[in-house]
Image: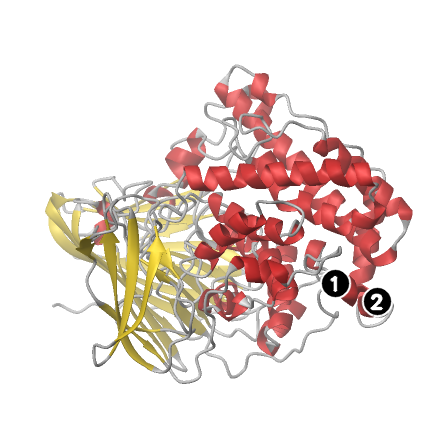
Amino acid sequence: FLTERTDNAILFSCPADGATVEVTPPGLAWLPAEGASGYRVEVRDRRGALVYEKAAGGDPVHLPDRALGPGTYTWDVVALNDRGEEAAHRGRQSFTVPEGAPELPWVDPEALLARVPAGHPRLIYLKRDLPGLRATLGTTRRRAWQGCLEAAERALSVPPPEYPTYHRTEDPTQCRLEYRDYYRRFSRYIDAALIDLSVAFLMSGEAKYAEAAKRILLAVASWPTDDEDVTSVSARWGDEPGLHLARCAHHAYDWLYDALSEGEREKVLGMCEARAWQTYRRLTRRNYLTYPGESHNGRLIAYLSEMAVAMAGEAEGARTWLEYSLKALTTFYPHWGGIEGGWAEGVSYGLGYNLIYVPALEGLRAACGLDLWRRPLFHKVRYFFFYCTALRGEIQPFGDGAERGGPGTGGGERFATLLGFHAHRFNDPYVGWWVRQMEGWKGLRGELSLVFEDDASSRPPTDLPHSRAFRGVGWAGLHSDLTRPDEDTCLLFKSSPFGSVSHSHADQNAFAILKGGKALAIPSGYYGPAYGQPHHAEWTRSTKANNCVLVNGEGQVIRQAKASGRVVAFEDRKGLTYVAGDAAAAYMGKLRKFDRHALFLRPGLFLLLDDLEALEPARFQWMLHAFEEMTLGEGRVVSRRGGATLDVRLRCPAGLTLSQTDRFDTPYNEGIPARFHEDLPNHWHVTAETGEMGADVTATRIGAAMGVWGPGERYELEALEQEG
């Protein structure tokens, strides 16, 4: 058996040794054994008696088919050779099942599919529930229904999408950018217009919505579905068009079923079935159940269970698809999630993916009676967004898309849709209150729009802590007052055990600061012009682009899971919060130590201490970034934006030299054909470099006292120095 992760994409073992689990039985996942043909799982009680034993097949995941009572257990995995003989033992680890843990054992996929209603619709909205839903469209669902109708009316004139041609472009950079432009347009046909029209028809029965939706659906149903096609999820030019079809086509089939002729049903079902097998082949070809770290596969594994429900009794592959999907959904999924509810890839991608799997979980709950919302990540993740954003925030640190609009901007609708759903699903008044602070929010949108009535319960979070850490993913959100978002001072901190892979950056021990939503210390750079293009790959993903530390001008290793960090301490009290991270491993040999300590004294003072040690004498660079030009003084940096101020006083025994530039090392448009150029503002970058006295040092400390205030909140900082 492997004893440590050897690949950026390999799974994490779970549950952690010694963990107290939150459902019974827990989903089990382990690092594989080289050459194993299969596995056997053994569970023993605290006396050593064998209480569960089962062949687990060839994948390193298993959910026992019966609940375990309260108590402490050990579990082991036995690797089997091709003759079924024992080849190796993984070694025993323990977990504890507490009193009252919800029961969530494995259920045979055939039995689950037998529960699916025979008619349509059956995905999220069941046919038997439609009369009751329709009766509330003018009352308790009126606001959401009006939004649905407005969206559907706009979509009535949307023509069928054109088949793509970008794959015929010879220049790879131009092809990539044409692909980007195409899939962004394509999503407006498929994820927006097709779904909006299908929901409107489902609830109203009006033929005009069905005809407009069919115009789109039948067009894409005529496209090729082989794995090599440009619209396949395995297309070598990019998978996004295929992903949009894999997400939405079976929804439209299910919801438009009554409006389709027999011939149209056969055509659309054939397309949906072919794309389901296409999805399954990609996942198995890439061995998703062992290597789930490729980001887009995290969408497909959820879609596969929806496809099985939508086509149950009509497609022979439904059982195969559902079984494969549930092996992930009931054990380690989502790969990027933490036990406390965090999302390692960042807020932007966390929003997208947590919206993506909602239809899968709702579909299984409604049609099969399988409630996966009881799994820990799924019922906790709302608080990651609650704490690790500023409610009025203009940005959403960290990772790809960090510079995009946060909840306080035009990007707020996605926050409101996801958290609005969770407020209803878990009857959470604090999250319901959070959603109500969104200006202009009109209710849930898209396929989820009518699952719940308009208004969730709401109560200000006066009795919640103002800060929280999510150690599983290495994030923390520190706030002065969650109940006053217009004045809230917020520091976001990241030091992640997931490293710098996928959509995460080389930013362990980085921070960002916002005041009333105004971004004063930012992760700099843009997620563009497209993923992996020079500016994104060379600047935005780098340590230098973040509020972090360089050694001799070099940062953490990019695109490496082992280039990781840890949140090693967190304490929250009424007047203060303390968080600390260890990011030495992220430099992969450049540093012996990089501990960053952050103490927040409410309402607006942060004390930051960096404890640094290199392998040999070096110079360290302390980085700070902002949207607007900063003011520099003797050991002082002031960042201002929209009436908010960040006043930083820096000290270091080795001395510091401050400099500032508004240039990216790799400009946004570098390497991009002229017709794709965009005129985006540069950001501002301050470097505080050690070695003012002319000597490098092996170890040093850099301290920063950072005052944050808004209009009318000014206070003075005075630096006091003491030897020792």
Q: Is residue 505 above or below residue 41?
A: above
Give the residue type that dot 2 points to: Pro
Give the residue type that dot 1 points to: Leu
Q: How is the image coloured?
A: secondary structure
Q: CA distance from mark 2 to mark 1?
A: 13 Å
Number of numbered callouts drawn: 2
The residue to which callout 1 is attached is 450
Q: Residue at x 54, y 21 (%)?
A: 174
Which residue reaches farthest top? 170
Q: Residue at x 74, y 38 (%)?
A: 266
> Closer to the camera: disc 2 or disc 1?
2
- Tell me residue 42's x, y (percent): 28, 66
Give the left or right position of residue 152, taking residue 306 as reference: right
Residue closer to the observer: 239 or 124: 124
> How many residues crowd around disc 2 within 10 Å: few (fewer than 14), some, or many (20 or more)?
few
Q: Earlier in the sequence, mark 2 or mark 1?
A: 2
